[in-house]
Image (spheres, grey):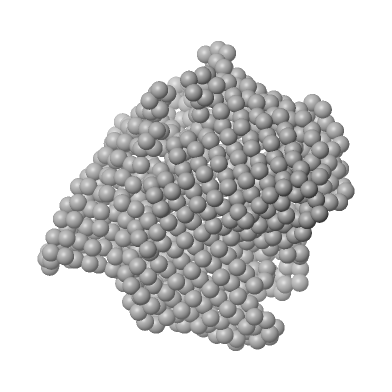
């Protein structure tokens, strides 16, 4: 059963006829980007609603709600919490007999209170407003009725109406931001903030760089309604030393048109590929990304179906040649895994229709892939699910001179799986028992080979890899049953290890799309190849391996203080590790964490290490450190250090960035200072 709501608990019951999930004990319900914890929960998959009771916690990014009882629609994100408290980033705390979530970042309180000091103070706060009714517009302002202002726990003022800004929304010049960069020279940024209205503001920034010249920047933010808003930013710089005009534009808009209909636009433009990489003030993600995407899409969703209308331009920032993939437009219709009427069969559907352009090739494409399956219970402990899929992909033309073409593919797969477990009683005061869960799975896939050399190659849809393969895996999970100081019990999965491999029954030398081969990694076992050689036209010839790598996935969490995750691909025939990716995180609750990561891929000159440190040093002082090291070239790619001191009223940040010399780019150092006064934050 697939659903946007993933439920875990000590006891879970699914009532298929009512499409209702009942859960009790350590309930965890996860949606896309959200999580709900409670003692009990009732999930209605038809109405897409959750009713939760007892120690309810709802987390949506940095926002958090806690209370006794919750009624919540996880599709629209709307609901009501009873007798609860909440936190809305960056620093708004609130409480109420009823807390109504009425939109993205909009909370209506009934008989409640709110404050802007929660992030750095414990009650009594410097100030707090208590009201008969109040509406919080996150990051903007609060409007209250029947309100009274309390200072350090004492009443100071009563007003029938009360409005409090939650951010520094005052028109005027902000504090200048000086710094130095070995590439830019001395620089000075002078921002000017314009509070256009309660739902709009803009920041104009003029930057002078002694080695580069003047840079103009604009950031504009707006809210059209409770469910519609966005932001626009632009930057222009004419470099004095290179005489180049360089610019970037970004636009983002989100809008909920109807409860099940949403619109989003993400538009990005760069005058040249290297602009974001060359200026260290950009985030590490911006400096290292390989593609630049621009998307506009409209999404209509139903309980079991979805329809997406999309326009997209994907620009490759890594290749020397300016390569773009354009979808102008694309329609996608999907049906989730669901019963086929009253029969024992299930079906699902993936389909799309698009007009695509890439370099000198353009074509219209329609892709349909219905799949039908029949879950069979072979025994109380074993289930076998055969499935068949028919895939039809048709093209209007393969090139400006070509004609229509198509591809038909038949797929079959059979999945055999079971779940076994054994409980071990420990009898300690805090650790009462351990459960060992074993989950073996065997999957057979058959997908006959078809000629795809004549098809235009735009993305992963245009090439399907032939399959006559058996995939087998063995999962082991260890769960600890813990008893708290108050006698309550909870479970913790402290260790999981899954080992998987695939066996190709008929390995052959085949032609593969270069786009498909570029997506293969040593951890993928659905296709393993060797002896790759280009044959032109976007294709390469390679020999399939009989056995894929043995892939091991390990997750170790013995306590909330320690997490270790690793994935390794081992080539048994060559007796060598083809890839190892590992991540270790040490948490110090309330103080920060240390995270170490490593990545190794044989044959691709990938041997990298990363380190992240976030530390609260106490009394408003914090430290952030990011380090990236390329061991294959013995180069320290980056050291990014930020030291910040903050109070409820102001903060100052010192930032130092060092980038090592890579290829033709020289080493670079950057220093920056940011001083900020905070009003109601």
Q: Is residue 120 found left or right of 480 in the rendered image?
A: left
Task: Give coordinates of residue 503: x percent, y percent.
Answer: 76, 28
Q: Name the quadrant of the C terminus.
A: bottom left
Residue closest to the eye, 115 or 51: 51
* Residue 357 appears in the picture as rendered: yes
How many callouts does the rendering have? 0
Q: Residue furthest top?
A: 379
Residue at (73, 27) in percent of width and height = 446
Residue at (27, 39) in percent of width and height = 69
Residue closest to the eye, 24 or 18: 18
Image height of 99 relative to 204, above or below? above
Image height of 392 relative to 476, above or below? below
Task: Give coordinates of residue 188: x percent, y percent.
Answer: 51, 83
Residue closest to the eye, 669 or 315: 315
Image height of 65 relative to 229, above or below? above
Q: Is residue 548 found left or right of 215 in the rendered image?
A: right
* Residue 521 appears in the picture as rendered: no
Q: Tell me which corner region of the image, top left, top right, bottom left or bottom right, holds residue 508.
A: top right
Q: Is residue 443 found left or right of 206 in the rendered image?
A: right
Image height of 424 relative to 69, above or below? above
Task: Give coordinates of residue 466: x percent, y percent.
Answer: 76, 34
Residue closest to the eye, 661 or 253: 253
Residue at (62, 69) in percent of width and height = 270
Residue at (44, 76) in percent of width and height = 203
Task: Give coordinates of residue 249: x percent, y percent.
Answer: 56, 70
Q: Is residue 20 found left or right of 493 in the rendered image?
A: left
């Amino acid at each position: 059963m697939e659903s946007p709501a993933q439920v875990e608990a000590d006891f879970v019951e699914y009532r298929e006829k009512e499409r209702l999930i009942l859960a009790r004990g350590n309930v965890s319900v996860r949606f896309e980007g959200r999580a709900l914890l409670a003692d009990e929960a009732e999930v209605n998959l038809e109405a897409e609603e959750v009713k939760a009771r007892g120690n309810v916690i709802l987390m949506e990014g940095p926002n958090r709600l806690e209370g006794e009882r919750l009624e919540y629609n996880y599709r629209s994100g709307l609901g009501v919490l009873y007798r609860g408290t909440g936190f809305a980033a960056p620093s708004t705390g609130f409480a109420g007999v009823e807390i109504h979530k009425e939109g993205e970042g909009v909370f209506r309180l009934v008989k409640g209170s709110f404050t802007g000091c929660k992030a750095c103070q414990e009650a009594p706060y410097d100030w707090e407003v208590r009201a008969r009714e109040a509406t919080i517009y996150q990051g903007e302002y609060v409007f209250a009725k029947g309100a009274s202002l309390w200072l350090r726990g004492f009443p100071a003022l009563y007003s029938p109406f009360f409005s409090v800004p939650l951010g520094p929304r005052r028109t005027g010049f902000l504090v200048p931001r000086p710094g130095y960069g070995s590439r830019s020279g001395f620089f000075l940024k002078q921002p000017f903030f314009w509070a256009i209205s309660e739902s709009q503001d803009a920041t104009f920034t003029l930057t002078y760089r002694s080695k580069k010249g003047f840079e103009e920047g604009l950031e504009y933010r707006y809210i059209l309604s409770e469910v519609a808003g966005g932001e626009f930013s632009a930057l222009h710089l004419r470099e004095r030393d290179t005489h180049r005009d360089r610019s970037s534009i970004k636009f983002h808009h989100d809008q909920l048109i109807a409860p099940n209909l949403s619109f989003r636009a993400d538009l990005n433009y760069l005058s040249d590929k290297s602009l974001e990489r060359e200026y260290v003030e950009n985030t590490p993600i911006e400096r290292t990304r390989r593609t630049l995407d621009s998307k506009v899409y409209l999404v209509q969703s139903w309980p079991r179906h979805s329809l997406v209308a999309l326009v997209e331009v994907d620009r490759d920032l890594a290749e020397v040649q300016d390569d773009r993939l354009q979808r102008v437009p694309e329609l996608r219709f999907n049906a989730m895994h669901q019963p086929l009427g009253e029969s024992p069969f299930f079906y699902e559907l993936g389909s799309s229709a698009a007009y695509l352009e890439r370099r000198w090739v353009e074509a219209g494409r329609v892709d349909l892939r219905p799949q039908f399956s029949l879950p069979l219970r072979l025994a109380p402990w074993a289930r076998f699910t055969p499935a068949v899929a028919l895939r039809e992909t048709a093209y209007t033309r393969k090139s400006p001179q070509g004609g229509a073409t198509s591809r038909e593919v038949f797929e079959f797969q059979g999945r055999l799986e079971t779940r076994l477990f054994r409980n071990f009683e420990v009898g300690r005061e805090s650790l009462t028992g351990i459960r060992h869960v074993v989950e073996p799975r065997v999957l057979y896939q058959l997908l006959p080979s078809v000629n795809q050399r004549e098809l235009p190659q735009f993305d992963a849809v245009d090439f399907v890899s032939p399959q006559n393969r058996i995939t087998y895996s063995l999962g082991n999970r260890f769960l600890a049953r813990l008893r708290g100081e108050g006698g309550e019990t909870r479970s913790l999965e402290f260790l999981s290890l899954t080992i998987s491999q695939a066996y190709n029954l008929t390995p052959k030398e085949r032609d593969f799309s270069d786009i498909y081969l570029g997506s293969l990694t040593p951890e993928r076992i659905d296709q393993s190849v060797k002896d790759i050689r280009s044959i032109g036209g976007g294709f390469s010839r390679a020999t399939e391996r009989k056995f894929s790598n043995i892939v091991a996935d390990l997750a170790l969490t013995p306590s909330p203080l320690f997490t270790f995750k690793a994935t390794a691909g081992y080539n048994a025939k060559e007796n060598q590790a083809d890839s190892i990716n590992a991540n270790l995180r040490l948490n110090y609750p309330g103080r920060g964490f240390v995270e170490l990561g490593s990545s190794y891929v044989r044959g691709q000159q990938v041997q990298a290490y990363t380190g992240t440190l976030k530390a609260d040093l106490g009394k408003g002082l914090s430290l952030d450190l990011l380090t990236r090291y390329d061991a294959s070239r013995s180069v320290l790619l980056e050291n990014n250090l930020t030291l910040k001191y903050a109070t409820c009223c102001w903060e100052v940040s010192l930032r130092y960035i060092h980038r090592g010399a890579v290829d033709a780019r020289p080493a670079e150092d950057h220093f920056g200072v940011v001083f900020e006064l905070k009003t109601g934050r």
